[in-house]
Image: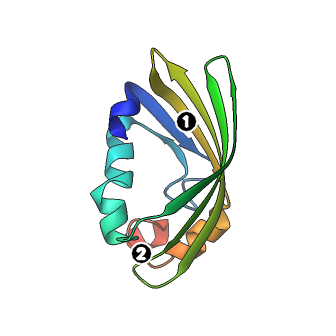
Amino acid sequence: MFSLLAEDAVWWVLGKPDQFLSCGSKDVETIKSAIGDVFFADIMSKGITFSIKSLTAEDNRVSAEVDGYGITNAVVVYDQNYHFLIEFENGKIKRLKEFLDTIHAREAFEGIPGTHPTLNN
């Protein structure tokens, strides 16, 4: 998956980083850390199953409506709906905007170190 990212790609997640750490803009190294071993080993070791509901492409952009489902290591159901807006440049993902229910995500990941700002203080 990471081979699809441009070296200077930016992944933006809807929401306020001071309320949920996954929100805001992230560079490639932060993306790799968040999505890679740390996220799936520490939070959802069995991963998330994604189901694409619709895709729309125009110019250098793809819009994707996606459902995601998984069980956290703390045995909390994560049942999420996403909208991704993906922009490409030179065959690589240059910018990705992720829209999701951040309240549900925060509730599912509550109590997991690194996902909630008050847990890091």
Residue drawn at (38%, 53%) of the image: 35
Q: Amino acid at mark 1?
A: Leu
Q: Circle 2 — which element?
A: loop
Is residue 48 among what the camera can see?
Answer: yes
Residue 50 falls in image quadrant = bottom right
Q: CA distance from mark 2 to mark 1?
A: 25 Å
The colour style of the image is rainbow
Residue drawn at (42%, 73%) of the image: 119
| Mark 2 Cα-neighbour bin, 10 Å: few <14, some 14–19, many ≥20 | some
Picture coordinates of residue 20, whole percent (x, y):
55, 61
Q: Circle 1 — which element?
A: strand
Q: Amino acid at mark 2?
A: Ile
Mark closest to the chain's N terminus, 2 or 1: 1
Picture coordinates of residue 19, whole percent (x, y):
58, 62
Residue 8 falls in image quadrant = top left
Q: Label 2 belongs to which residue? A: 112
Residue drawn at (61%, 19%) of the image: 60
Q: Quadrant of the N terminus?
A: top left
Q: Label 1 belongs to which residue? A: 96
Q: Is residue 20 above or below residue 16?
A: below
Is residue 121 among what the camera can see?
Answer: no
Picture coordinates of residue 84, whole percent (x, y):
63, 42
